[in-house]
Image (cartoon, helix red, strand yellow):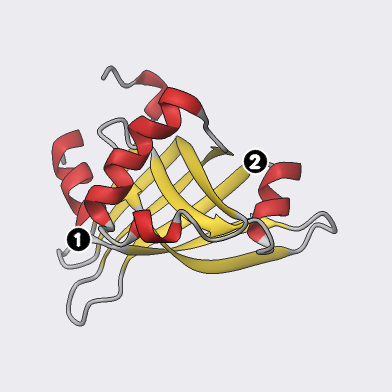
Amino acid sequence: MTHEALLEFMRSEKYAVQTSVSQGGLPQAAVVGIAVTDRFEIVFDTLASSRKAPNLRANPAIAFVIGGTREGDERTVQYEGTADEPSGGELERLLAVYYARFPDGPERRSWPGLIYVRVKPTWIRYSNFNTNPPEIIEFDPVTWTH
């Protein structure tokens, strides 16, 4: 699988299960709408009052599961990364990608407490159980050139 094919698959999914760790060390999960940049960054919005926002501010480690929700399609991406809240020009770059995916996004921008989270990948695994034997490929984003 090429990086381009991986990116295409990730972009084919509008939602993902996102996980973070509470300050008490407990796992917490939520479904979030995602947009994926050409650099494999994931962008999503959330309310500052959500559980994930303070979790990620205290511990930026984050994970996602993308895919696996369509009947008869057993492909998934497991994705680990580091979250931050970009600002300025970097936020505007990411919002262009996010708004292209979610045209209603600009309407939500006025919500009190809405924040945008960017995740930079540290590890990605693609699994395709539609084939026998299964295709399982790990990508190391640290070694990628963009």
Q: CA distance from mark 2 to mark 1?
A: 35 Å
According to the image, label 2 marks what residue? 60
Label 1 sits on what residue type? Pro
Q: Position of residue 66 (x, y in %)?
A: 35, 60
Query: Which numbered tag is attached to residue 133?
Result: 1
Q: Is residue 23 above or below residue 85?
A: below
Label 2 sits on what residue type? Pro
Q: Position of residue 78 (x, y in %)?
A: 41, 53
Check disc 2: other Cα within 10 Å, few if <14, some if 14-19, many if 20+: some
Q: Position of residue 12 (x, y in %)?
A: 19, 58
Name the residue furthest right. Answer: 24
Q: Is residue 2 visible?
A: no
Pick whichever, 61 or 92, lies toward us: 92
Q: Quadrant of residue 22?
A: bottom right
Nearer the N terminus, badge 2 or badge 1?
2
Per the image, label 2 sits on a secondary structure element best described as loop
Quarter of the image that includes the N terminus: top left
Q: Position of residue 128 (x, y in %)?
A: 23, 60
Per the image, label 1 sits on a secondary structure element best described as loop
